[in-house]
Image (spheres, rainbow, N blue to C red):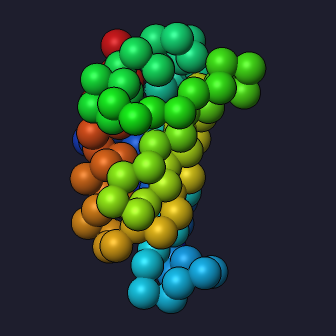
Amino acid sequence: MTISRVREGYRLTYIKPCVTDKNRKMAEVMLGLGSPVDPEFMFSRLKAIYPDLGCSKELGLARIKNDGMTLMVFSNGRIIVREAKSEADILRHVTEIANALRV
């Protein structure tokens, strides 16, 4: 399933049941950033929303754990979501991240 959410600034590549738990969802999203963001900028903006953020500057990756869900945010705008409770949870978090990374 591909859903375009241009207004929110991202393209949802897919949402489907998780491999490990069919009651949870996984997704891949591409933010419409235009170009990769500086990892330090990404980390500082996301840390304001998710204080327990894990970061890898070398990989340009931020890892967020929230209510059993894992979100991996890459500096190129790709987001991988695992073990979300619902599609609504995915869309809410992705929209928050997209808004935080807008310059």
**Farthest residue, direction bottom:** 22
Q: Is residue 64 left or right of residue 98?
A: right
Q: Residue furthest front?
A: 52
Estimate the x, y position of residue 57 in percent, counting from the top left.
Answer: 66, 19
Residue ID at (53%, 33%): 54
Query: Which residue appears at 36% of the width and 47% of the height?
Result: 94
Residue at the farthest right position = 58
Report which quarter residue 100 is drawn in: top left
Residue 100 visible within the image? no
Residue at coordinates 47% horizontally, 20% vertically from top-left?
42
Q: Nearer the viewer, residue 45 or 78?
A: 45
Look at the image and tell me in which quarter the C terminus lies: top left
Residue 15 in picture, x, y percent from top left? 48, 70
Point out residue 17 in the picture as x, y percentages from the top left corner. 51, 81
Q: How many marks?
A: 0
Position in image of residue 79 (x %, y %): 53, 45
Query: In the image, is residue 30 above or below residue 103?
Result: below
For the point 47% across and 26% down, the residue is 33
Q: Is residue 101 above or below residue 97?
A: above
Residues 69 and 32: in front is: 69
Observer able to see residue 47? yes
